[in-house]
Image (cartoon, rainbow, N blue to C red):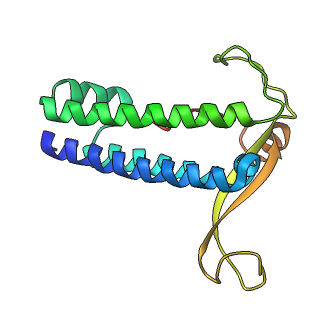
Amino acid sequence: MSEEDTGSHIGEAISKLKDILDESRLKYEELGNNFVNQGIGVLCQGIEVYAKLFRRTGLQDREALEYAISKSPSDVQETYLELLNIEDDWSEFLSILEASEPNTEEGSTPQVGDKIASDLILYRVRDVLSTEADPSSAPHGTSVKIFTGITLADLLQSTARSVTLLVLNRHFA
């Protein structure tokens, strides 16, 4: 993988992340406080953007990406700074979402090993094809995001494994 290719792949990721964030902001304006329940799946598209970036660059994780960037020419490093700027924009948007959510309390940042209430509601986001039997959905055969609330206790009971690892991140890399 050439450094030029790395810069190009980062640039592509930046463009897609900006588009996703812009779409999320519009959806937030449309849905208001219902965004978390009905529209947040838009943000999940960012996971694939980072996955594709890592696949295309042949790098395994964020640390490897940062190391490769540190050894790259200044134009690639500047492109990477743009990626960091778009991540700051995501953080700002997420802070707005958090502030608008009812029943959120200011508290300390969660740490590894912290206890979580078992009645905490999590949201599963799945892509499914719409059906004619569901007139409220998009046209037949198009992809629709389905949001399902589930408590942490129910999620843990529904897994067949004896151990479940939950990773909660503001960013996907």
Residue plotted at (72% across, 17% down): 114
Instruction: Please provide percent x and percent y for residue 21.
Output: 50, 47
- Who is closer to the viewer here, 143 or 154? 143
Above or below, comparing residue 173 to residue 125 in the picture: above
In this rendering, the count of numbered labels is: 0
Instruction: Please provide percent x and percent y for residue 44.
Output: 56, 49
Image quarter hosting the N terminus? top left
Q: Is residue 85 left or right of residue 165?
A: left
Residue plotted at (14% across, 29% down): 74
Can residue 61 be seen from the camera position used here?
no
Q: Quadrant of residue 144?
A: bottom right
Above or below, comparing residue 133 to residue 156 in the picture: below
Instruction: Please provide percent x and percent y for residue 22.
Output: 49, 51
Image quarter hosting the C terminus? top left
- Who is closer to the viewer here, 35 or 149? 35
Residue plotted at (37% across, 31% down): 84
Can residue 30 be seen from the camera position used here?
yes
Q: Is residue 77 left or right of residue 164?
A: left
Q: Quadrant of residue 10?
A: top left
Hey, which residue is sitting farthest top in the picture? Answer: 108
Hey, which residue is sitting farthest front in the picture? Answer: 29
Residue plotted at (63% across, 34% down): 96
Instruction: Please provide percent x and percent y for residue 50.
Output: 41, 44
Q: Is residue 171 left or right of residue 142?
A: left
Hey, which residue is sitting farthest right in the picture? Answer: 119
